[in-house]
Image (tube, coloured by chain):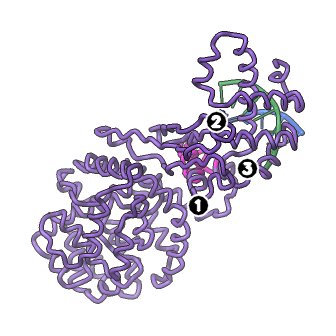
Chain colours: A purple, B green, C blue
Amino acid sequence: MLKQVMEDESAEAIQFECLLVEPQDDHVSVDAFLCFHRNSSEKNMEMENFPCRSDGLKFGTDQEKEHLLGQEVLDLNPSKIEAENFQEPTGPSSTCEDYLLDVEFGDGGIKLDNDSTVALQNLVSGSYNQVDRAGDNGTTENSDSSGTADQVSNCQGDLDMTDSESHNIFSCTADGEMSLEQRWFKYPTFSIQNLEEDVSSMFSERNNKTMSFTPGLPSGGMLCPSTVEHTSAGAEANEESFLGDDASLSKNHTQAGSFSTSSEKRLRKPPQRFIDELSEPKSTSSRKRKEVAAPTSKIKLPHVSYHQQCDVKSRGDRWFPEESTGIAIQVPFGPIVQKESRTTHVPVVAKVLLQPNIEASMSGSDDDDAAEVILGEDGGRRKHHILWTVSEVRKLMDGVSQYGVGRWSRIKKDFFSSSAHRTPVDLKDKWRNLLKASCAQGESKRGDDRKRNLAWRPLPKSILQQVSELATLYPYPRDLRSKR
DNA sequence: CTTAGGG
DNA sequence: CCCTAAG
């Protein structure tokens, strides 16, 4: 195999894949790997210029080659490769999740959790030392390195990009949005990464999960759901662009195919997903997606759809734009990887904050201020529970008064077009609940537990009153109304 | 796809 | 909110 690789230079990418797909023997593969780099430095350099790039393994320069060939190869790479695993860029959070599930980490899990914790905290508090760390790593090239932590930084410094670029990539904004993930989307590495993965697996077998996780690795950013969500938007675009720019690699699809192949060997789900998405990019309806993969596993698909929902809904750019009254700001959070990391359970808490209620002063009866939304740990199959703001309820009432009950689609289009969430079904459900609430209010008024109602009913009675009136005007199709 | 309804 | 059945 090695000879093939060396002799045939025209399609080295594919042969590279060969190397990836079938590492028969650890020693042989490693040796081949090394020899390959020693004997074909030009190609390596080509790969360096290649849009894809390697963060963890750097064999572009002679220095690095020597590094690789040196005695520390076996010691250094595993950690870095492990780091690679955490930064696997092939997909949004789901990918990471699945991937993490498939990879066994020794200490990595804990480390990851810590990082993710920090990242999460960062989202709330707005301060994260990763900024500093990333700044150091990104802007300081040729930083003296010693120890695994510095190895990583060294790797990062070796990325051939301008300082501004690197800074842009590594610097975490105060919002904690920028992270390695984005970097990955910016600089995807497919073939190289595969190689790394396989080498990683080899090392895994070798060292039997005893290798330590690189301490200074800012891998937390990856697990930061916000990152995932924020980047997932551009992810697809970048993906496409990647495939497009990848013309230099000659066969994109071939590459992709072998990629998925090698991945399937490792029982990874993401490739399947990407195959689906790529094979039918116009699967507009989630229903279609369901039908496609229903036979295989029903759990998986809702998962995907969930993430896509997240992607849509947590774009965040337009949440309640026209709401001058109460602006709900939700930290865009996605599900977090947790299943394998029970050591440190990070309850994902997204806070929905309403700005100092102007509406309260206006109507004097609005009392929603903050709500905690705890995302399920099951991967978040359920949509975020976004609290209905009073203004939303008002809009809903306006819609009902204008179109009547039942034309939720129209109401959504006319009154909730700006809010990506709030599907017509949501409107319907909300109206149903409002009716119920109004009924309950009427009854509770006579009763004694009116006080208790206030606890769980943020809706002002004026609203409920209007709901009641509307209910009389536009009777609800069914029994709910008769109850009134 | 939209709506109604149950969970 | 989710899911499903019915138009």
Which circle's residue, 2 or 1, is located before the other in the chain?
1
Say which quadrant the N terminus of chain A sits in. Answer: bottom left
In terms of secondary structure, what is the magenta stretch mainly?
helix
Q: Say what amino acid the circle numbered 2 marks.
A: Asp
Which residue is depicted at the point 39% across and 73% down? A168
Looking at the rendered image, the disc whose residue lies closer to the viewer, 3 or 1, is 3
- How many circles with numbers are drawn on the protein? 3
Which circle's residue, 3 or 2, is located before the other in the chain?
2
Residue placed farthest to the left in the image? A71
Looking at the rendered image, the disc whose residue lies closer to the viewer, 3 or 2, is 2
Asked if the residue at tag 1 contacts the one at tag 2, i.e. Cβ–Cβ closer than 8 Å, the answer is no
Distance (Cα) linking label 2 and label 1: 44 Å
Q: Which residue is mark 3?
A: A416
Residue A343 image position (x, y, % from top left): 28, 38
Say what secondary structure mark 1 lies in. Answer: helix
Which residue is depicted at the point 85% across and 39% down? A401
Q: Say what amino acid the circle numbered 1 marks.
A: Glu
Examine the structure image and report whether residue A120 is included in the region drawn in magenta: no
> What segment carries the magenta color?
A290-309
A315 vs A404: above or below:
below
Distance (Cα) linking label 3 and label 2: 20 Å
Which circle's residue, 3 or 1, is located before the other in the chain?
1
- Res A277 label: 1
Q: Which residue is mark 2?
A: A366
A113 vs A143: above or below:
above
Residue placed farthest to the front in the image? A361
Crowd around label 2: few <14 · some 14–19 · many ≥20 (10 Å): many
